[in-house]
């Protein structure tokens, strides 16, 4: 008798899963309808022109396509140049890794760099000189207590990559609290640039740990640099179109990408409720190494909206690790690069204050509210 009580709002059921799938299918149908409407709109726009003008527009589009193909060749050569110069950076990155992991101690000459601490020390010395006449009678230095212990210097730079991740907003959102002890074992990230096929790989190197047996976790990205046949004028340069992860050999009980949950399921006809235990995906940075699989012959319209969002996010993360985190790791570790990111955004008027002003205007003048939506971020 107790088994046929209604489910709570937090419980998942078979019927709910089917409903969610139907909603997703309807959303995809709606997206396809919008795409079709846009095509019809473009066709109607062309029909407004006289035949002679329409013919000339087609000739201009053909010229535009030739220019786009030249642009694609330009970007392809730029990628080759990037790969060439990346090899010049590699020795610097290797030396950085040795310093971070206490394999090399920089000399005094190598460590000479102006810092805020040096400025403060110089200012302190200056203040002492100016106030020495007003200083009270000097007290002899007190001997140090034998129980006082000075902490030994840490080896290398502890938590270097984890701290850099936490100072980069996109990665900070991915890193969970249970990921942090694992990322403390991250010793280096190396980039490999390939000219043909166009792409790059990210190798995450780990010291021995209790979580998994891998010493390197690899993520590969394939890029294309050619205009799309169906939509050539949206070409903006090389783009990532596919990625490949790797298998993490987790030790028993250490897999942070999975969790066990209990779900209640209701039988469709009998109404009987049962509790089942399922293993589901858990939020974790290490899901980064298990990207969604897309068939080689898959067309854009075959990819649903949820999968497209996952791929877009994954490609964006890989791009930023290669272009920002690896080249500027020390600046993300210190937090200086975070200030540079803030400079990419412009301040806008407070929306709440604007609403209040609008309400005030409506009350005094009887005016109409106008909602203005603006995009204030762009993908690089």
Image (cartoon, helix red, strand yellow):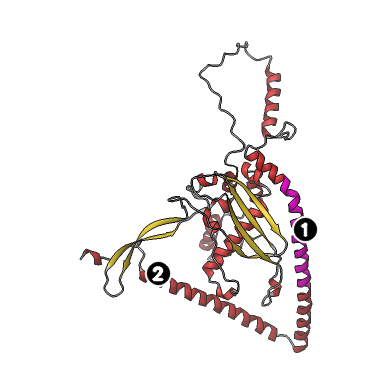
Q: What stretch is highlighted in magenta?
A: 67-91
Q: Residue at x 69, y 86 (%)?
A: 47
Residue 293 sits in which quadrant?
bottom right
Where is residue 186? Give x, y as percent: 57, 46
Residue 68 within the magenta-colored segment of the rendering: yes
What is the crowding at mark 1: few (fewer than 14 residues within 10 Å), some, or many (at least 20)? Answer: few
* Relative vertical location of residue 89 with respect to residue 262 in this rendering, above or below: above
Position of 266 compared to 216: left or right?
A: left
Dominant SS in magenta: helix
What is the crowding at mark 2: few (fewer than 14 residues within 10 Å), some, or many (at least 20)? Answer: few
Residue 379 sits in which quadrant?
bottom right
Where is residue 93? Give x, y as percent: 69, 46
Q: Is residue 361 visible?
A: yes
Where disc 2 sits, the SS reads helix
Outermost left residue = 1
Please name the residue that numbered disc 1 is placed on.
81
Where is residue 227? Give x, y as percent: 71, 72
Q: Earlier in the sequence, mark 2 or mark 1?
A: 2
Where disc 1 sits, the SS reads helix
Q: State the residue in front, 357 or 137.
A: 137
Please name the residue that numbered disc 2 is placed on.
17
* Relative vertical location of residue 328 with respect to residue 23 in this rendering, above or below: above
Residue 138 sits in which quadrant?
top right
Q: Is residue 367 visible?
A: no
Outermost bottom residue = 51
Residue 215 within the magenta-colored segment of the rendering: no
Where is residue 28? Give x, y as percent: 51, 74
Which quarter of the rendered picture does the N terminus lie within?
bottom left
Position of 22 compared to 119: left or right?
A: left
């Amino acid at each position: 008798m107790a088994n046929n009580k209604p489910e709570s709002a937090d419980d998942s059921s078979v019927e709910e899963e089917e409903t969610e799938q139907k909603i997703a299918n309807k959303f995809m149908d709606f997206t396809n309808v919008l795409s079709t409407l846009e095509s019809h709109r473009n066709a109607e726009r062309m029909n407004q022109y006289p035949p002679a003008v329409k013919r000339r527009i087609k000739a201009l589009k053909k010229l535009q396509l030739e220019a786009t193909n030249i642009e694609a060749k330009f970007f392809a050569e730029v990628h080759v140049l990037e790969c060439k110069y990346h090899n010049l950076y590699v020795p610097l990155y290797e030396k950085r890794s040795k310093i971070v992991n206490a394999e090399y101690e920089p000399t005094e000459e190598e460590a000479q760099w102006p810092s805020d601490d040096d400025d403060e020390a110089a200012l302190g010395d200056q203040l002492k000189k100016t106030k020495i006449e007003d200083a009270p009678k000097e007290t002899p230095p007190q001997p140090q207590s034998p129980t006082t212990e000075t902490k030994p210097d840490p080896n290398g730079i502890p938590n270097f990559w984890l701290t850099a991740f936490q100072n980069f907003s996109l990665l900070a959102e991915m890193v969970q609290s249970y990921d942090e002890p694992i990322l403390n074992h991250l010793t280096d990230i190396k980039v490999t640039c390939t000219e043909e096929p166009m792409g790059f790989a990210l190798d995450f190197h780990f010291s021995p740990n209790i979580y998994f047996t891998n010493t390197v976790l690899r993520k590969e990205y394939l890029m294309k640099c050619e205009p799309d046949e169906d939509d050539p004028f949206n070409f903006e340069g090389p783009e990532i179109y596919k990625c490949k992860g790797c298998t993490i050999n987790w030790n028993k009980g250490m897999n942070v990408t999975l969790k066990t949950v209990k779900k209640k399921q209701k039988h469709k006809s009998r109404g009987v409720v049962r509790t089942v235990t399922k293993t589901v995906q858990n939020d974790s940075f290490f899901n980064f190494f298990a990207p969604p699989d897309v068939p080689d012959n898959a067309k854009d319209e075959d990819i649903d909206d949820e999968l497209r969002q996952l791929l877009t996010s994954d490609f964006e993360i890989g791009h930023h690790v290669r272009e920002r985190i690896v080249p500027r790791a020390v600046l993300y570790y210190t937090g200086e690069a975070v200030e540079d990111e803030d400079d990419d955004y412009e301040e806008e008027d407070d929306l709440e204050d604007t609403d209040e002003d609008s309400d005030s205007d409506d009350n005094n003048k009887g005016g109409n509210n106008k909602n203005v939506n603006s995009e204030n971020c762009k993908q690089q």
